[in-house]
Amino acid sequence: MHQSSKLKNGLRLILAPLTETKAVTVLVLLPVGSRYETKKINGVSHFVEHLLFKGTAKRPTSLDITKELDAVGAEYNAFTGKDHTGYYIKVAAERIELAFDILSDMLFNSTFDQAEIDKERGVIIEEINMYNDNPLIHLGGLFEQTIFGNHPLGWLISGPKQVIKTVSRQQIVAYKQQHYQPHNIVLTVAGNFKTNTVKRLANQYFGLASKTKNKKSFKKIQIRQSQPRVNILYKDTQQVQLGLGFPAFETANPKIFALYVLAVILGGNMSSRLFINVREKHGLAYYIRTDLSTYHDTGNFLVQAGLDRKRIKEALVLIIAELQDIKANGVTPKELRAAKDFLKGKLILDLEDSENIADWYGKQVLLLGKTYTPAERLKKISAVSLFDVATVAKEIFQSKHFNLAMIGPFKNSAEFKKLLKL
């Protein structure tokens, strides 16, 4: 069982003991990402994430940070999303204080040296180039640009190159100071630890007083889509990357569990409808899958595939036919049972590791405002009925809400738009 508490400065502390391991993961999550930015500083959340590894007063260089962690065989990384940023260190249980020390040092004492900022501009630009040159990675961003438009949810997390080249140290530091306050932090510790020790370390390393109590809000979105949208990025490739999807539910919507089940049945594994029909029966794709993304105020349901460019229309017709069939006829009891069993098994395997357990509890507290235990989540999934799945399929799969993003050797969007009918 997990435990939740708050430090005096408002920091939320989540403890998830796991006695079957000799490791521990310390994860820091903050409610800040690219949707909190303005156009002028789009990409700064991700920039800050990079810079926190570049030196502190106690550890002046990146090497000073990494060599301490490498010396004990630690695993460590960070990530930036559209609505959250995270930093974690996973170590042998007896090294837990080192994880607290380094994470808190990075969060509160990073120096943001101007020379390091200027060097990191080049690193991030090369990261952007890597994404742009890899259609498989680039497609997700292109799809969300299509569905969310010029709203911050439609912007790239990495930001445009011009912002990365020109954003100032003053802008970066001001943004970091505004968001990286203790009362915004969710600190999750999962693995083998003593509760009293972790509480002492949390107060010692993260117990400093908040400098400000204001909480930066984000711009909410209301999707008013009345016709299909097609967004094609021309690239002379042999394989076309396709993203076909719809607006969907927000994170806290109770219908999300039925949509998870639907996503598995349609394209969640190698037994799914789309995999069998598009890949196995017709040989049109190397990969095809569904993905479900959720945010505070919206979400999206995505079918993503890498397809033969000469047979792209044939594949698109097949995909839409599967959507039509589920919308019209629902799913079978056998499919429903199999999807539930798949989700149960996947959850059990995921939660064998302290890193995934920390992520499980921390993100729920940060993004959902409450926590489901694994048993509670499985109960929600088990309660999904055939009627529930049919209902969300009818609600989500609507012709006017089609969004198609493609990367490949095409320029005429009209020929694809006319296929987007249910």
Image: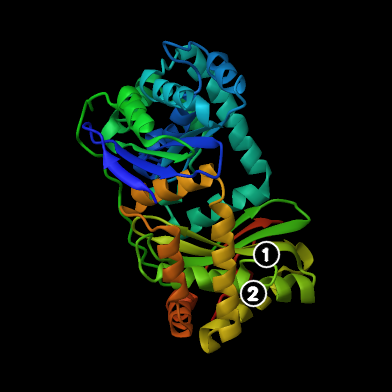
Provide residue 384's location: percent of width, then percent of height: 45, 77
Q: Which mark is residue 119?
A: none
Q: What percent of the width, then of the height, locates residue 243?
A: 59, 61
Q: Secondary structure at mark 1?
A: strand
Mark 2 and 1 residues: CB-CB less than 8 Å, in contact? yes
Place residue 342 in its image quadrant: bottom right
Q: Earlier in the sequence, mark 2 or mark 1?
A: 1
Left or right of 33 on screen, residue 238: right
Residue 407 seen anywhere in this rendered image of the structure: yes
Q: Is residue 5 above or below residue 303?
A: above
Q: How is the image coloured?
A: rainbow
Instruction: Residue under label 1, please give it.
Output: 288
Camera-side residue of 81 and 72: 72
| In front of the other: 311 or 77 | 77
In terms of image quadrants, where is residue 311?
bottom right
Given the image, on which type of amino acid does mark 2 rest? Ile
Q: What residue occupies the far bottom of the structure in this picture? A: 329
Left of 85 or right of it: where is 354? Answer: right
User: Which residue position is annotated with label 2?
Assistant: 319
Disc 1 residue type (three-letter): Ile
Q: Residue at x 25, y 34 (%)?
A: 7
The kind of secondary structure element at disc 2 is helix
Badge 2: few (under 14), some or many (20 or more) residues near its Cα, within 10 Å? many
In whole angstroms, how far apart are the C-alphas of marks 2 and 1? 10 Å
Q: Which residue is rendered at x = 22% and y = 25% of the image?
A: 211
Marks 2 and 1: which is nearer the front?
1
| Rendered view: 172 above or below 260 | above
